[in-house]
Image (cartoon, rainbow, N blue to C red):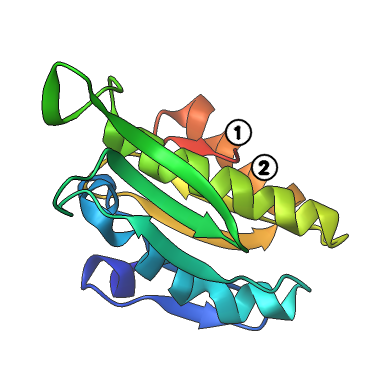
Amino acid sequence: MQALSSGEDVMWTAGGAWRADGEDLADGEVDAWLGGISAALNDCGVELHLATVTGPFDEDSAGYALAVNGTPRYLYMYAADEPKVPATEDPWMECSIAPAAEVNRLLEVAGSSRRLALFWPGGNDGFSVLGEESVLRRAGERGLTSGSWDCVIP
């Protein structure tokens, strides 16, 4: 965890831990985050192809959309009456949870027992861990009961 707090991601075969700062993700960094995870996902049988369809700062953008394996997915749309203002209540959370849920769907389809968990999702100190689902669930339960951390496996 010390490496993550100093700005480094940590990887191992079929797993790792990556920074997932909700603000950065909402500002267009989802493809960079998932791109950093792609080698470990490949070890799990998931091939990940990413492309930003429309970025949050693109001129005439209607929101933030990312294509995952060719399928476009809006992470958030802009409010019709307020251009450049996300129509969602919490774009930081949306840009953390929705991509992780898609990764977990792909892992399940591939038959992998690994999942992507988010610790402090949507926050500035958020990070993600790819590991065995059973281990991540136990860690999440312990954090919840102790009040030490918030962990979600979307």
Mark 1 element type: helix
Give amino acid for label 2: Arg
Quadrant where the C terminus sits is: top right
- Left or right of 114 on screen, residue 86: left
Q: Residue at x 51, y 57 (%)?
A: 67
Q: From the viewer's perspective, tell me whether residue 59 is left or right of residue 125.
A: left
Q: Nearer the viewer, residue 110 or 136?
A: 110
Residue density around tag 1, few if under 14, some if 14–19, many if 20 or more, within 10 Å: some
From the top left corner, tell me how far across and down residue 50 is, in percent. Answer: 50, 68
Residue position for label 1: 141
Q: Residue at x 62, y 64 (%)?
A: 69
Q: Specify the quadrant of the image occupied by residue 82.
A: top left
Q: Which mark is residue 138?
A: 2
**What residue type is disc 1 on?**
Glu
| Label 2 element class | helix
The reply to whether discs 2 and 1 touch (Cβ–Cβ < 8 Å) is yes
In the depicted structure, whether residue 90 falls above or below residue 53:
above
